[in-house]
Amino acid sequence: MNPLKYRSIFLSDLHLGNRWCRAGNLSGFLSSVECDNLYLVGDIIDGWNIGPRHTWPASHTSVLRSILSLAGKTAVTYIPGNHDEFMNRFDGQSVCGVRIRSEAVHTAADGKKYLVVHGHQFDVVMLYSRWLAWAGNRAYSLAQQLNTGINCIRSLAGREYWSLSSFLKNRVKRAVKYISRYESRIARSVRDVGAEGIICGHIHNP
């Protein structure tokens, strides 16, 4: 099958290294597309969940290899988020053909410009209460574990997949976004760079 061709693709919040990352789906997607520009919009690698008691699955390495193989013919830009902030040390550099940038401005086919950032820089929990963000991450991981049991039961009942962790996170993120005036912070940043809009991740919600 011929790959689908796109001008630009934006991926965020893959969380490679986290056991719940759907690496197989990612590899399948990356092998089925071609693009001129690939933006990795933060939290590509889940540094918060990598440690002595964690293993790095081979399937996650395959995703990274797919990305690096694209870098030979595609402009790949990696914009670190909060879970992969260790990549900020390479800001302004190119690593294996992948450009590392704290932010980027994307020019669409119609000439309009869009600011591309992960989005955590607008989250007051991340800015002022990092311990709360870490605690939320642990709770999210627990919810992901509960997903397995819940969806086994749903599958037996002929029901489609449903994500408890995403449901809970969306509710919390919506509340935080309202309290912190998340969208107002974004709008100011867009105006500062003279862009038409913003492309970001972080809240795990389109």
Image (tube, rainbow, N blue to C red):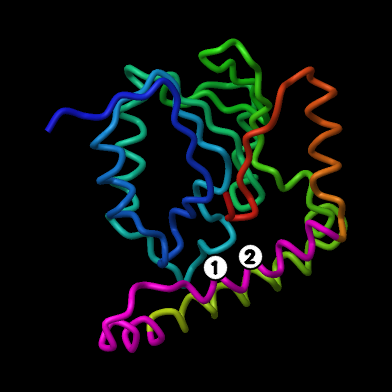
Q: Amino acid at mark 1?
A: Ser
The residue tagged 2 is 170
Residue sitting at 39 percent across and 18 percent down?
A: 36
* Residue bearing mark 1: 166
**Quarter of the image with the N terminus in it:** top left
Magenta span includes 156: yes
Instruction: Read off the magenta span.
Output: 149-178
Residue 185, above or below 165: above
Q: Verify whether residue 32 appears in magenta.
A: no
Q: Secondary structure at mark 1?
A: helix
- Mark 2 → mark 1, Cα distance in angstroms: 6 Å
Q: Main secondary structure of the magenta part?
A: helix
Please tell me how crowded label 2 is: few (under 14), some (14-19), or many (20+) other residues with Cα within 10 Å. some
**Residue 171 locus on image (x, y percent):** 68, 69
Instruction: Please tell me whether residue 96 is drawn above or below residue 109 in the rendered image.
Output: below
Q: Mark 2 touching mark 1, by CB under 8 A? A: yes
Of residues 107 and 159, the one nearer the viewer is 159
Q: In this rendering, would 166 be left or right of 16?
A: right
Residue at point 59% right, 60% down?
48
Say which residue appears at 36% left-offset and 23% top-offset: 35
Residue 46 marker:
none
Question: Percent from the top left, x then y, of residue 97?
Answer: 42, 21
